[in-house]
Amino acid sequence: MAGIRKLELEEALALGSGWRHACHALLYAPDPGTLFGRIPLRYAVLMQMRFDGRLGFPGGFVSVRDGGLEAGLNRELTEELGEAAADFRVERADYRSSHAGPGARIVAHFYAKRLTLQQLVAVEMGAPRAKDHGLEVLGLVRVPLYTLRDGVGGLPAFLENSFIGAAKEQLLEALQDLELVEPGSLTARKITLPR
C-alpha cells in the first residue's frame, strides 16, 4: 500500500470538495458448513470480480451530500448485488477504516457487515439479476478461509489473485480484527483450522 495513508473518518470527511469518496463493504456470515465433510468453513465472506478482472468489495463512488456515506453505499450495494441487498442496511456502526491514495484525490471508506447465512445466500442468488451484473460486476466469489494440507490451496492461493487498491489489505485486516480466522494465523500467511 505504498503511498496510501490511513485516515480517521472525521479527517476524511473534512478533506473538502476536491476529494471524491468511495465506499465498499465486506459482507460476511457465520457458516456452520464443512468442505468435503471435514474442513470447517466457519464464515462465508463475499468479494466480487470486477469489470477490470481484479477482486474487490461491492460498493462505489458516493456523494457525501446526498444522504451521507452509508446511504450512498447502500444504493451501490443494491445496484451491484440486487434487491436482496435492500433487506439489510450498512450503518455507521459497520465502519472499519478510511484510506487516501496518492495522486488522485480519492478517499476509500471500508465497512464490514455481518449478515445471517440466509441473507448472504439470498445476495448470492439475486446478484445475477442486479442492474450492474455483467457490467461493473462480473460475479461474486466466497473467500476460502482455510488452508489445505498442501499449504497452498485455500486462502494462500486466493491471496495470489489481483486485488483493486487496498482491497487485499482490507480483507486481511477484517479477517483478523473480526476474528473470522484464528488470531495470529495471518501473520504466517497460513490459516489454521479451528479446533
Image: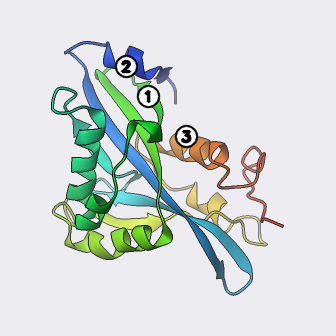
Earlier sequence position, callout 2 versus callout 3:
2
Bin the neighbour count of mark 2 within 10 Å (Cα to Cα): few under 14, some 14-19, many 20 and up.
Answer: many
Residue visible at 15% across and 32% down? Answer: 66
Image spot of residue 112 (x, y percent): 47, 47
Which amino acid, by three-letter code, is at mark 3? Glu
Q: Dot 1: what SS?
A: strand
Q: Dot 2: what SS?
A: helix
Earlier sequence position, callout 1 versus callout 2:
2
Rendered position, 117 above or below 177: below
Residue visible at 36% across and 73% down? Answer: 122
| Circles 1 and 2: CB atoms closer than 8 Å | yes
Q: Is residue 168 left or right of residue 40?
A: left
- Choose between 108 and 166: the one closer to the eye: 108
Mark nearer the viewer, 2 or 3: 2
Bin the neighbour count of mark 3 within 10 Å (Cα to Cα): few under 14, some 14-19, many 20 and up.
Answer: few
- Choose between 148 and 178: the one closer to the eye: 178
**Which residue is denoted by mark 3 in the rendering?**
169
Which amino acid, by three-letter code, is at mark 2? Ala
Image spot of residue 120 (x, y percent): 42, 67
Q: Give the quarter of the figure containing the C terminus.
A: bottom right
Rendered position, 143 above or below 76: below
Which amino acid, by three-letter code, is at mark 1? Ser
Image spot of residue 17 (x, y percent): 19, 15
**Which residue is denoted by mark 2 in the rendering?**
12
Bin the neighbour count of mark 1 within 10 Å (Cα to Cα): few under 14, some 14-19, many 20 and up.
Answer: many
**Which residue is denoted by mark 1 in the rendering?**
98
- Choose between 152 and 166: the one closer to the eye: 166
